[in-house]
Image (cartoon, coloured by chain):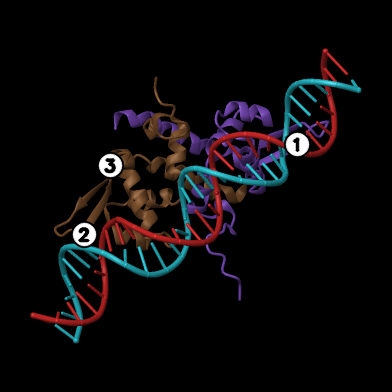
Chain colours: A brown, B purple, C cyan, D red
Amino acid sequence: MDTPEKHELVAPICSNFHNTIEFIGRRWMGVVVYSLMDGPKRFHEISANIPGISDRLLTERLNELIKEGLATKTQLVSSTKSEYKLTPKGLALKEVIAAIHNWTDQCRTL
Amino acid sequence: MDTPEKHELVAPICSNFHNTIEFIGRRWMGVVVYSLMDGPKRFHEISANIPGISDRLLTERLNELIKEGLATKTQLVSSTKSEYKLTPKGLALKEVIAAIHNWTDQCRTL
DNA sequence: TCTCAAACTTACTAATGGTAAGTTAATTTT
DNA sequence: AAAATTAACTTACCATTAGTAAGTTTGAGA
């Protein structure tokens, strides 16, 4: 018998609508992905891009993106430099971001 | 001088990308909206539609939707019956849901 | 009238997030 | 070359949000 896992994300996040939206809806996740949409960025660049986010949460969200295959991390020359980049799977969220943007815009007339 | 409000949502949720995704990304919010997409529903119907959600959180999410103008509540005859319905603003999220669905599908090949 | 169901509400615990300070290695400045 | 600074984390602690379960109120049905 399997151990019942309740609401833990055992299945890949993209296995259904609920998993997906709960994942990309975690606090700050949306803007972190958004920030990486226009190309690879350093940790401090993402941080500077997102007013209000703390190092701790940014580290956590980036690690979650990596774990789920939406981003990769590259250590540059020294150990104090790293770069984050979206994978094709991460880049494919562009449509979702666009849809939210559209909603945000048309919202004023609704 | 205004009191600084930190990260509270003072502006309408649809005023920018960050506000919007943080709002629709709250736990269970996505599936609650999804559940209402195909027409008005009673409280217990939504609840039955979403395995795992508690009455407390469902109440909270529905009230947030109402507060932000994405849904309305109608008291039916007696006070023990109520019906929830998406407003045009809420219905307009259909595109966002579709985009997430598409991502979920193409995810397998990425 | 007695029981049951709908739609909450309350109380309490667990998990997640916010804030700030500390760490380590590599630059840059003096 | 020593001192200060920066990058990228990590740790610790408190606050907020979520999960779980039991209780409340009104109305409908047997």
Disc number placed over residue B74 in the picture, else none: 1
Which residue is denoted by mark 3 in the rendering? A87
Q: Quadrant of residue A72?
A: top left
> Could you classify mark 1 by the number of other residues whose Cα lies within 10 Å: few (under 14), some (14-19), or many (20 or more)?
few
Q: Is residue A21 left or right of residue A41?
A: right
Front residue of D8/A71: it is: D8
Residue under mark 1: which chain is it in? B
Q: Quadrant of the N terminus of chain B?
A: bottom right
Q: Is residue A105 above or below residue A9?
A: below
Q: Residue at x 39, y 54 (%)?
A: A57
User: From mark 1 to mark 2, how far is it between C-alphas?
Assistant: 56 Å
**Which amino acid type is marked by label 2?**
Lys
Residue B19 location, x and y as percent?
A: 52, 53
Disc number placed over residue A81 in the picture, else none: 2
Q: Quadrant of the C terminus of chain B?
A: top left
Q: Is residue A88 left or right of residue B35?
A: left
Residue under mark 2: which chain is it in? A
Q: Is residue B10 left or right of residue B102?
A: right
Residue B46 appears in the rendering: yes
**Which amino acid type is marked by label 1?**
Thr
Q: Are marks 1 and 2 on the same chain?
A: no
Residue B42 appears in the rendering: no
> Could you classify mark 3 by the number of other residues whose Cα lies within 10 Å: few (under 14), some (14-19), or many (20 or more)?
some
**Which amino acid type is marked by label 3?**
Thr
Q: Are marks 1 and 3 on the same chain?
A: no
Asked whether disc 2 touches disc 3, contact meaning CB atoms under 8 Å apart, the reply is: no
How many numbered discs sit on the rendered protein? 3
Q: Are marks 2 and 3 on the same chain?
A: yes
User: From mark 2 to mark 3, how far is it between C-alphas?
Assistant: 20 Å
